[in-house]
Amino acid sequence: MLKNFRDEKKRALLIQVLGLFSVFAFIGYLFHNTQMNLAKLNIATGFGFFELEAGFDIGESLIEYWSDDTYLKALGVGILNTLKVAIIGNILAVVLGVLIGLGHLSDNWMLKKICRVYIETVRNIPLLLQLFLWYALLTEGLPAVKEAIEILPSVFLSNRGLNIPSPVDITSFSVSLIVLIFSVIGYFLLDSKRDQLVNETGVESPLWEKLNFLVFLLPIITWALMGASTEFSVPKLQGFNFTGGYNLTPEFAALLFGLVIYTAAFNAEITRAGIQSIPKGQWEASHSLGLSKVDTIKRIILPQSLRVIVPPLTSQVLNLTKNSSLAVAIGFPDFVAITNTTMNQTGQAVECVFLIMIVYLTFSLLTSLFMNWFNKRFAIVER
């Protein structure tokens, strides 16, 4: 036994096993102690409350929901609302961050200073205060419903949000929109593959152009197969509010604006650092070949700088998703807000906190997997 302990590899393995056992033993102790304390207080445990009637309304939902639906469906609404904020917010924050990062490197003195002031100001104001600011501006600065501004025909802006026409057949529209998004992604993947084959063979096949054309036929075919509905619900003022159409609430808008503007400031600095990491000789070589500054950034600088940009950008994507939990402060029904309501009504505190941890952990792991896959596409390949 002593001889085995002197072996460095076996000793390291034994220490790891003991450490792992200690961790599981500690978790088991906490679980047992929690169960005993809950039993003394006559508090039921488990997830049986999922099938009980929720009994509360949710102001904003991507799927049909009523107060007599189950807690499980209410939590599902919260997950979808969180995903909506995270996906839209991250796309806008990345695009805005890249544009501001490029503006910070501009030769235009005014543009450069404006971008710099934006970055330094927004990064140093707590996000929660910014959310309160945006919410106050949207609810207090916009006109009342009866004085709503008609921006476009049947598009109204008021302190209760933005009311726009929406398709009557939501299911058909949603499926067609998802297919369109995947078609756009497929187009860019096919276009990238076509460029790769052209560079390798020097021959451009017309088949790839036909494939790109067929990609955009998929959403049209999907829409036709699902009934080809063209009927829209138009918002109309009735009484003290609008009926019909789709309402973009001030809570969602304030949360989205706050998260995008705050995160974009960090993304801008990441973009600036990534671009400045590229040797100056790359700029000079591209200029000597007659490329414009826009083409240089698009074709030479940005593709190389992605190797530096993507790893820290992953952290900001994760941060925006997790920061969306601050929605509870301004009344947007995200997953945390709905879970808090569920916890208050059922008393299942341990289960609800566990659900919040699992959901956000799942979001983070899936985001990391996607960003790591994306990063590998631009990683420097060692020979």
Image (spheres, rainbow, N blue to C red):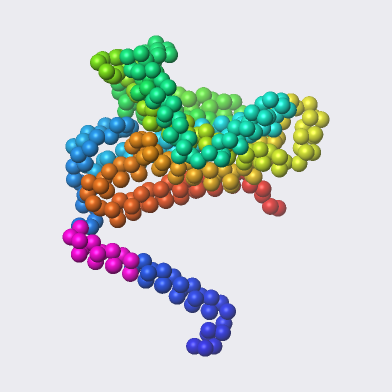
In this view, the residue farthest toward the right is 288
Q: Is residue 120 left or right of residue 29?
A: right
Front in this rendered view, residue 74 or 11? 74
Q: How many marks?
A: 0
User: What residue is rendered at 79% in x and 38% in y?
Assistant: 281
Report the residue at 27% width, 43% height from top. Answer: 341
User: Residue shown at 36%/13% (left/top)?
Assistant: 147
For residue 68, above or below residue 34: above
Quick check: is 35 in the magenta stretch?
yes
Identify the residue at image location x=56%, y=77%: 9
* Residue 253, placed above or below residue 236: below
Picture coordinates of residue 289 (x, y %)?
79, 29
Residue furthest out toward the bottom: 2
Instruction: Provide the residue span drawn in magenta.
Output: 29-43
Is residue 68 within the magenta segment? no
Camera-side residue: 138 or 272?
138
Q: Position of residue 109 (x, y in %)?
A: 72, 26
User: Quick check: can you spot residue 303?
Assistant: no
Left or right: where 378 falls relative to 344 = right
Q: Quadrant of residue 106?
A: top right
**In this orientation, does residue 122 appear?**
yes
Q: Quadrant of residue 205?
A: top right
Above or below, 113 relative to 236: below
Q: Depth check: 153 or 237 in front?
A: 237
Position of residue 301 measured from the top left corner of the image (x, y, whole percent): 69, 36
